[in-house]
Amino acid sequence: MTKYIFVTGGVTSSLGKGIIAASLAKLLQARGFKVTIQKFDPYINVDPGTLNPYEHGECYVTEDGAETDLDLGHYERFLNIYTTQANNVTTGRIYQTVINKEREGAYLGKTVQVIPHITDEIKNRMQALSASGYDIIITEIGGTVGDIESLPFIEAVRQLQWELPEGDCLVVHLTLVPYLKAAKELKTKPTQHSVKMMSENGVHPDIIVCRTEQPLPKDLKNKIALFCNVKPDAVIEAADARSIYEVPLLMRQEKLDEICLKKLNITWFPEPELGIWEAFLNKLHNPKSTVTIGLIGKYIELQDAYKSILEAFIHAGAINECKVIVQDVHSESITSENVKHKLEGLDGLLVAPGFGHRGIDGKILAVQYARENGLPFFGICLGMQMSVIEFSRNVLKLPHAHSTEMDPNTSDPVIDLMEGQKTITSKGGTMRLGAYPCNIEAGSLAHRIYGAAQITERHRHRWEFNNRYLEAVQAAGMKASGLNPETGLVEIVEIPAHPFFIGVQYHPELKSTVENPHPLFVHFVGAAKKHAAQKKVSGAEILQEN
Ligand code: GLN
């Protein structure tokens, strides 16, 4: 009874397939359907957990601890649902399963081949989530049609189209209609070629979504329809939007969801309920104030490396009716000489998650600046660990305090490898991953922020606060206000004497959605707003004195 929508991409990468898939899913969900989205990636890595952010942007972690593609973050932020391990499948994972089965003797002496064994495994996984009772499953196929590595996935879609009952499955193909400035014309040829290539592989798109920088005139839609063998109303314009969160509304205007439903033989459906979404957009586009937050990281040149953090700021900004300008500060560029100059204009400071030694000294200097100058501070994972190191060095006066990740021989390992990690040698999927509970101390900043005594948050780390130093750190004024109830692992640190200083071992950014902005981000932006307002007042006082 589950219906399937496949989203493929042609012409070029980075067209925003994930956003189109998430927007379509949002519209279907807003019409009352139970929808999920999954991403099938054609690369050989078993999951993106071992990929460098330079290769693949942020690694998104699900509740159940899967290290996944960042598009799953978009799916969760748009749909306000949790995705799982099953929502992200790679070629590596498919082959791993098939090869393991072959080693177990499951193929009874048969020659194991791409067709049918690999494609069967792909098809099984494409349908796996139907057991969870979804009305519609949207599957985004990563990569671009024509890539050699995408072929088994396209072939699996071809087979499924024949195996599933008529009208249970459709293909949406996303292409680019480029505007050639010199010719002053939009060009449809790349779309025609890409659809032709799909057809050569036996899959015919039912709907063509055209990314374009210019409005797509009716005659051009007709032309694409004619050459690509679809009805003109199945040619959808996807113009550049002010924000990715506007795309569902643009797709509603273009009737993408209605056309999909009709093609899936669903003839009755209610109007989409998008009140919360529209209210969010309204706030997002009409901010009443502005704050500047410094994002201290080492992948600053890469927008995708901190995707969920940037999106969480958008959600938190909207609810605060405040435009959040995120100013990237490269941690390697911070020195004790320039730290004041670089950070003094900011209203808040976020020290980002990360791995390895590069840029660490700059992060520690940035924490020190925020702590000493009452600048709202928010440290996430490595950022929290750096705040503990900074505090130990400069307040506890342990000058060699460090994490054993960066200095294995430090005399004061205030951050140390978790006990369970000490025997682990293999890298893939072996960190402390996914959701764990955390008990919050009554009366703490964290308690005020969450309004709850127990929470669960998602993790991705190997090192932790070394509890040998807990007493000394707390006595000196940094509180561990959140602990794992079973192990005592420190999840949250804060400095009560500071206006807003909080570090968390987990990744709150992964759980922020349009409909549920994360309270830590919401309160951090609130604290930055307060800081900005105070700066204005004291600026005015100085002017008056002069
Ligand atoms: N490298 C640190 C650890 O593994 C922090 C990880 C992170 O920031 N995600 O504990």
Image: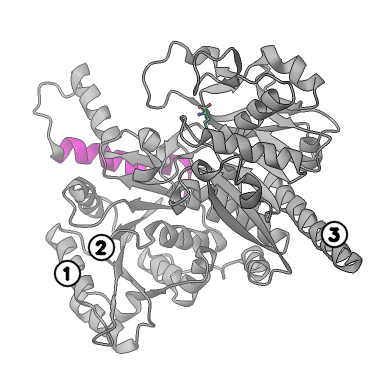
Mark 3 residue type: Ser
List the single residue furthest toward the right. Answer: 545
Label 3 CA crowd tier, 10 Å (few <14, some 14–19, many 20+): few
Mark 1 residue type: His
> In the rendered image, which residue does mark 3 sit on?
538
Between discs 1 and 2, the one toward the N terminus: 2
Q: Position of residue 409 (x, y in %)?
A: 51, 13
Q: In this view, does 10 lie above or below 220?
A: above
Q: Residue at x 46, y 71 (%)?
A: 251
Q: Residue at x 50, y 61 (%)?
A: 28
Q: Where is residue 105 in the image (x, y as percent from the top left)?
A: 18, 18
Between discs 3 and 1, the one toward the N terminus: 1
Magenta run includes residue 332? no
Label 1 C-beta lies within 8 Å of the nearest ligand 1 atom? no
Which is more foreground, mark 3 or mark 1? 3
> In the rendered image, which residue does mark 1 sit on?
193
Tags 1 and 2 touching, CB below 8 Å: yes
Q: Is residue 519 left or right of residue 414?
A: right
Q: Which residue is drawn at 47% across and 30% down?
A: 357
Number of disc labels: 3
Q: Main secondary structure of the magenta part?
A: helix
Label 2 CA crowd tier, 10 Å (few <14, some 14–19, many 20+): many
Q: Position of residue 201 (x, y in %)?
A: 14, 57
Q: Is residue 217 left or right of residue 499?
A: left
Towards the viewer: 509 or 127:
509
> In the rendered image, which residue does mark 2 sit on?
10
Q: In this view, does 383 lie above or below 296?
A: above
Residue 375 at least partly seen = yes
